[in-house]
Amino acid sequence: MSIPATCPKCHFTVSVPKEYLGRKAKCAQCREVFVVGETPKPETPSKPAKEVKKIPNPLASHGPVILCPTLQTKEQYQKFRAAILGPLQEPVAMEPVSTGYKLALGLLAAVLALLFCAYLGMILGLCYLEYYYFTEILGAMTKELESAQGKSGTAMLAAILAVPTELS
């Protein structure tokens, strides 16, 4: 026959044989040592429980939604804002910067400006080369093709490839 053994701390109940009545046992959940068969004494709180202030559901009300219940008045909000943002509105002291650091920044800025100019020059140069190719070289090739009418295939190929040859 078995009897129930209840832990006085966590109220975990387990069935134990009747032979264990009056012996000490250890709770399997909280590891509290207790005597089997003794009824757990109800704990009496030393202080009464604090009354919990119920906050109304802002979604159920039709009024303004208050996200922070401690800041319900405009004055409280302004004091809170001044306390948080006050240190951020003070001027920030600048640390002195060495001359070498200033020179390094100036040199870096000059190098970056020169790189920009070099890239811009390369782009403009490529645009001019394309313009020159399409206006001058293709124009000369079409003239050579017109003059090579009825001549050998190598002369026409040379005209297409823009290889300078004497057409005779």
Image (cartoon, rainbow, N blue to C red):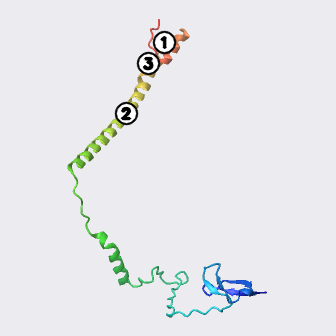
Bin the neighbour count of mark 3 within 10 Å (Cα to Cα): few under 14, some 14-19, many 20 and up. some
Name the residue carrying label 3. 140
**Type of the residue with mark 3:** Ala
Residue position marked by numbered label 1 in the rendering: 147
Give the residue at mark 2: 122
Q: Quadrant of residue 40?
A: bottom right
Q: Earlier in the sequence, mark 2 or mark 1?
A: 2
Q: CA distance from mark 3 to mark 2?
A: 26 Å
For badge 2, the amino acid type reads Met
- Whole-angstrom CA distance, mark 2 to mark 1, is 36 Å
- Give the secondary structure at mark 1: helix
Q: Nearer the viewer, mark 3 or mark 2?
A: 2
* In front of the other: 97 or 62: 97
From the viewer's perspective, is residue 25 above or below residue 89? Answer: below
Quarter of the figure with residue 96: bottom left
Q: Which mark is residue 88?
A: none
Tell me which label, 1 or 3, sits earlier in the chain. 3
